[in-house]
Image: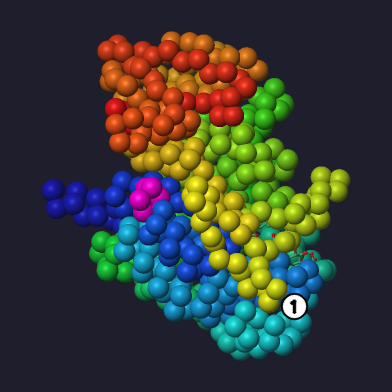
Amino acid sequence: MKMKLLILAALLGLSFAQFDPHMKNGRTSMVHLFEWRWADIAAECERYLAPNGFGGVQISPPSESIVVTNPWHPWWQRYQPISYNLCSRSGNENELKDMITRCNNVGVNIYVDAVINHMCGSGGGAGTHSSCGSYFNANTKDFPSVPYSAWDFNDGKCNTGSGEIENYNDVNQVRNCRLVGLLDLALEKDYVRGKVADYMNKLIDMGVAGFRVDACKHMWPGDLSAVYGRLNNLNTKWFSSGSKPFIFQEVIDLGGEPIKASEYTGLGRVTEFKYGAKLGNVIRKWNGEKLSYLSNWGEGWGMMPTGKALAFVDNHDNQRGHGAGGASIVTFWDSRLYKMAVGLMLAHPYGVTRVMSSYRWTRNIVNGQDQNDWIGPPSNGDGSTKPVTINADSTCGNGWVCEHRWRQIKNMVIFRNVVNGQTLSNWWSNGGNQIAFSRGSRGFIVINNDDWALDATLNTGLPGGTYCDVISGQKEGSKCTGKQVQVGGDGRAYFKISNSEEDPFIAIHADSKL
Ligand code: QV4
Ligand code: CA
C-alpha cells in the first residue's frame, strides 16, 4: 500500500511541476526586465536581484526577429520571429548563455518569452532585415534559417476572407487565422512541433527555468500540450533532477469570449489579466469600487485558482494600451497609485507575482490612444539598445524606469518572501478605502486610500516589539531609516496615516523588527 502511495505522490508531483517556478532560497517573485540587454540582466542579477530576494527574471524574446524601420525599430518587432537563432537586440547567443549562467549561479531564474504561435507579419517583405541578418521571405512564407516553408503555416485552415482573425467569438479563427497579420504556424504538424520544441529545449539545456508562452489563446491546447510534452527537464546543474520547465501562458481572458483561461490551466499557469484590470479600478476608486471590497480578493473576484495564476499589475502591452485592461491599468506613470497597487499585490497571497520594469518613452495621447505606443527601448543612433546605468541613489539612468528598484517595491518583494506560506489574517477595514491585514504572524500591511487620515489601533497579529516600516524606509543595522511601529505584547499597534502622504501605506514584517 505504502509503495502505491509513493508512486501516486511521485506522479502527482511530476504532473504539477510545471506550475512551480522553481525559485531558490525562499524567493517568490519575478521581474520582467522588458527589453534589457543580456549583459545588463547578468549584472543586475548579481548586484541587485539576488541580494534583494528576487526569484527570477522574465526576459524579452531572444529569438531572431524582423527589423522594422517604419516605425523605427518598434519594441514589438521582437514579437515577429524570423528564425530561432538566439540573437536579438538584447544580445547574441554567447551573451545569452553567459547571462543565464551568471543569474543561475546567484539563484535568480531566467524565464524566456517564447513566441511560438507565428512568425513575422504577412507584410514583412523579403530580405535580410532581421536581427542577425538571416534571409526570409514573408510573401512566400519562406524562413530558411529554421527552415519553415509555406507548408508549415495555417492558411488552408483559416475560414476568414482576410486570413486574419476577424471575430473572437469564433474559436476556430482565433486559433487558425492570423493575429494582426502574423503568419500563423501549423502547430498540429509534427514537424512544426519539433522545431518549436528544439528551440525551447536548447534554452532549457542552457539553464532557463521556464517560459512565458506568448499568444496562447491563438494556439489549440492540444497542440501546446504536445509541444510541452516534448520539453526536456531542467538542467541538473542548477535544478533538482526531474524538474519540469515552469510554464505561464499568456491568455487574455476578461470574460465575454468563448475561449477561457481554464482551457489552459491544466497545462501550466496562466496570466490573470483580471487582476490588474480590477485592481486598477479599485485603486483609482472608479465605478464605486472600494479597497474594503478586497476582503475576498482573488478567486472571490472571479479570478482563476491561485495555484494556476501568474499575477501582475501591468505588463508590457497594457502599460501602453496594447493589451487588455484599458484605462484602469495603473503603471509607473501613476507612481503614487502604482506603489500602492504593487505593494498590495506583493502582500497578498494570490498567485505567483511578476513585477514590471519598464523604460520611459515620450507619450503622445490623442483621443485616449498613445500615438507613440510603438517606441522601442532607449537606443543609440544605430538602433542598438542603450545599457542600463545605475545612479548613486540606486535608480537607473539612460531612460530605464527600474520600478523593481523603487524602495517601496523592492522592500515588498522581500516582504513577500518573509511571509511566504502564511495565510491572510486579521483583516480590517473602515468600510471605505482603509484596509489592513497580516500574513499569519510574519507581516502586516495597512493602507489609507481615503481622502482623510487613517487613525486607528489595529491587531497586527505580530509579536510585540519595535518594527521598521519598509515603505517610508527600512531597517539598516540597528535603526529604522523611516517610520517605526510599536507593537504591544497583545499584538496591537497604533497607526496614523495622513491621506496627503506620498506613500499612504505602512508595512512591517519579522525581518524589519529591531
Ligand atoms: C498590421 C495590420 C494587420 C496586417 C499586418 C500586415 O494591423 O492587419 O495584416 O500589418 O503585416 C504589429 C503592429 C500591427 C501589424 C503587425 C504586423 O502593431 O499593426 O499588423 O505588427 O503584422 C505585439 C504588439 C502588436 C504587434 C505584434 C507583432 O502588441 O501590436 O503588431 O507584437 O509585432 C491579443 C492577443 C495577445 C496579444 C495582444 C497584443 O490575444 O496574445 O493581442 N499579446 C501578445 C504579446 C504582444 C504581441 C503579440 C501577442 C503577438 O504580449 O506584445 O503583439 O506576438 O489580445
Ligand atoms: Ca495560431
Residue furthest to the front in view is 392
Residue 121 appears at what percent x and percent y?
Answer: 72, 73
Q: Give the residues drawn in magenta, as a range.
A: 49-55
Instruction: Identify the residue at the far right of this view.
Output: 367
Single out the residue that lies furthest toward the left: 2
For disc 1, the marked residue is: 124
Decide which of 364, 253 is in the foreground and name it.
364
Res 302 visible? no
Residue 99 against residue 3 in the figure, above or below: below
Q: Is 282 placed above or below 82 here?
A: above
Spot occupied by residue 75 in the image (x, y as percentages of width and height): 67, 64
Which residue shows up at 61% across the image and 59% down it? 398
Q: Does 178 appear in magenta? A: no
- Residue 415 appears in the picture as rendered: yes
Specify the quadrant that holds the C terminus: top left
State ligand 1's quadrant: bottom right
Tell me: is circle 1 under 8 Å from ligand 1. yes
Dot 1: within a 10 Å radius of its alpha carbon, few (fewer than 14), some, or many (20 or more) residues?
A: many
Q: How many marks on residues?
A: 1
Q: Secondary structure at mark 1?
A: loop
| Nearest to the observer: residue 496 or residue 258 | 496
Measuring 75% from the left and 70% from the top, which residue is drawn there?
72
* Amino acid at pointer 1: Gly
Q: Main secondary structure of the magenta part?
A: loop
Q: Horizontal placement of 165 versus 428: left or right?
A: right
State the image coordinates of residue 392 (x, y, percent, origin top left): 49, 51
Question: 409 or 261: nearer the eye?
Answer: 409
Residue 379 x %, y %: 66, 67
In this rendering, the answer to whether 245 lies above or below 305 is below
x 19%, y 49%: residue: 5
